[in-house]
């Protein structure tokens, strides 16, 4: 998408702008495409797998990875909801 780096923060910014824009459908579509490029639909699966593994072995909990998966899953579900509105 030009010079804009693909990241979860960029997707969040696009979704916020889409919520207040007359052309929100266009911004939401761009955010969805970016989320798919970053493979965010897989984030929920990764989150559940890391939660299960950390539940079984509490000594090896990587909270940074769990937090990243949680944020990515929330961004994906937010994108999904706005795209279907």
Image (cartoon, helix red, strand yellow):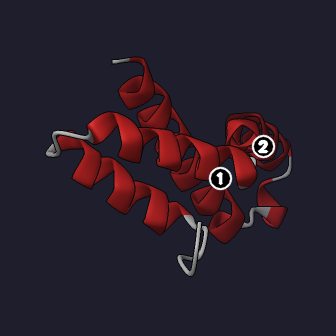
Judge the density around disc 2: few (<14), some (14-19), many (≥20) Cα neighbours within 10 Å. Answer: some
Determine which quarter of the picture holds residue 41. top right
Determine which quarter of the picture holds residue 67. bottom right
Judge the density around disc 1: few (<14), some (14-19), many (≥20) Cα neighbours within 10 Å. Answer: many
Q: Is residue 75 left or right of residue 49?
A: left
Front in this rendered view, residue 19 or 71: 19
Which of pointers 2 and 1 lies earlier in the amino acid sequence?
2
- The percent position of residue 70, horizontal first and vertical second, equals 57, 49
Q: Is residue 34 above or below residue 45?
A: below
Residue under numbered circle 1: 69
Front in this rendered view, residue 53 or 27: 27
SS class, disc 1 = helix
Q: Residue at the spot x=53%, y=61% of the render?
A: 8
For the N terminus, give its image quadrant. Answer: bottom right
- The percent position of residue 63, horizontal first and vertical second, equals 64, 65
Q: Is residue 57 above or below residue 9?
A: above
Q: Residue at the spot x=85%, y=51% of the render?
A: 57
Q: Which mark is residue 46?
A: 2
Q: Is residue 53 left or right of residue 63?
A: right
């Amino acid at each position: 998408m030009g010079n804009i780096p693909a990241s979860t923060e960029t997707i969040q910014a696009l979704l916020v702008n889409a919520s207040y824009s007359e052309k929100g459908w266009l911004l939401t579509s761009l955010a969805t495409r970016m989320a798919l490029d970053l493979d965010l639909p897989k984030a929920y699966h990764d989150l559940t797998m890391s939660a299960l593994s950390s539940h079984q072995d509490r000594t090896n909990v990587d909270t940074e990875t769990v937090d990243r998966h949680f944020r990515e899953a929330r961004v994906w579900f937010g994108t999904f909801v706005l795209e279907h509105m």
